[in-house]
Image: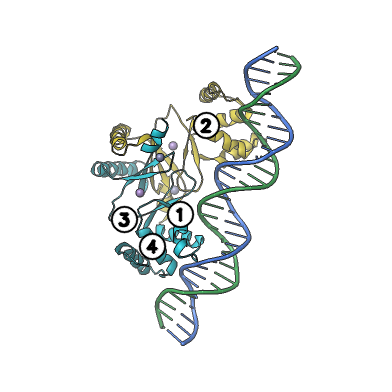
Chain colours: A yellow, B cyan, C blue, D green
Amino acid sequence: MRKNKKSIEMEKCLKTQGFRMTLPRRVILDFLSKTDEHLLAKDIYLKINKNHPDIGLTTVYRTLDLLVKLSLINKFEFGEGQSRYELTWDLKEHHHHLFCLKCGKIIDYNDFIDDEVKFFTKIQKFLSKKYKFNIQNHEVHFYGKCNQCHELLH
Amino acid sequence: MRKNKKSIEMEKCLKTQGFRMTLPRRVILDFLSKTDEHLLAKDIYLKINKNHPDIGLTTVYRTLDLLVKLSLINKFEFGEGQSRYELTWDLKEHHHHLFCLKCGKIIDYNDFIDDEVKFFTKIQKFLSKKYKFNIQNHEVHFYGKCNQCHELLH
DNA sequence: ATGTTAATGATAATCATTTTCAATAAGGAG
DNA sequence: CTCCTTATTGAAAATGATTATCATTAACAT
Ligand SMILES: [Mn+2]
Ligand SMILES: [Mn+2]
Ligand SMILES: [Zn+2]
Ligand SMILES: [Zn+2]
């Protein structure tokens, strides 16, 4: 198992917060640090299972929960009835999602990011005050059909 | 069971699409038309169950699915592991949500609606073209702590 | 009033996620 | 390096929301 810069950073984060660095955690961190997909717990379990058949699905869930708590990964739902996880890059900035209702394809975007940041900063400030609401984060999802799926309907 | 204007409209929509107008559907439509909360299937089932103990949870789910398909109600998820439903008002315009991560309180807002509509129209147009994506709708969720829950942390 | 068939409700099945608990191993103390 | 404490793991069972089955019922067109 080779570790890259990102997974080493994440390991450090775990250790400094007092968590033990175990083999399953190392494997999961390493795997996550090398993909930019939005994966299901089961996806991660199956991929890892080839080289590490001893790591159980339960542990994958537990590790994902932990990483979410440490803000190292994000957890999303797109109405599929199961959660998807994605690395919280410091490389890849904050971004939003396009979700294809037909095939489940997910597109990240952060175009308009200047406009958008300005807009959301403004609106968050306004909403916080008006509704006395302490806003921690936001999600923007666009739903529709991707190129391929749209063409398929002749 | 007294019906109001909104539930009569919805009944008409069902009938014109060729669906039968049954007692359970009438009861569920009537109930939904009189609340502005974001309810779980179980919530609806339990409320209705007092006056109509013969209407089953299965039927509630089936009716909600149907109403979503007809765009009479919206289905949302806020990361709770279950879906919430809300009437699609023509009275209440398109709006977005604040969700309290502590107590689950949901706040609707449609302030900034002019700015926001303009902004989302623009961004949707851009994204559609750039990613060749046929956008049907969008959701914006702000997550954080409501007034009460924020104060509770001393 | 009658027949066709969509809709219902009780029950069982699914499926993602969580809990339990005995066995293991990380990492600090000596 | 060895020992000890206890966080972590994995197998299995439990949970909880949603869906599928299927025999029975009732909407509504004729
Ligand atoms: Mn993403
Ligand atoms: Mn709402
Ligand atoms: Zn697609
Ligand atoms: Zn709250």
Q: Which mark is residue B29?
A: 4
Q: Which mark is residue B89?
A: 3
Q: Nearer the observer, disc 2 or disc 1? A: 1
**Reading the chain from its start, which is encountered first: label 1 or label 3?**
1
Q: Is B15 drawn above or below residue A82 in the view shown? A: below
**Category of crowding for the residue at label 3, using alpha-carbon neighbours closer than 10 angstroms: few (below 14), some (14–19), many (at least 20):** some
Q: Which quadrant is the N terminus of chain B positioned in? A: bottom left
Q: Which residue is mark 2?
A: A67
Q: Nearer the observer, disc 1 or disc 3? A: 1
Q: Amino acid at mark 1?
A: Asp
**Category of crowding for the residue at label 1, using alpha-carbon neighbours closer than 10 angstroms: few (below 14), some (14–19), many (at least 20):** few
Residue drawn 38% across the image and 62% down it: B29
SS of the residue under disc 1: helix
Q: Chain of mark 2?
A: A
**Reading the chain from its start, which is encountered first: label 1 or label 4?**
4
Q: Which mark is residue B43?
A: 1
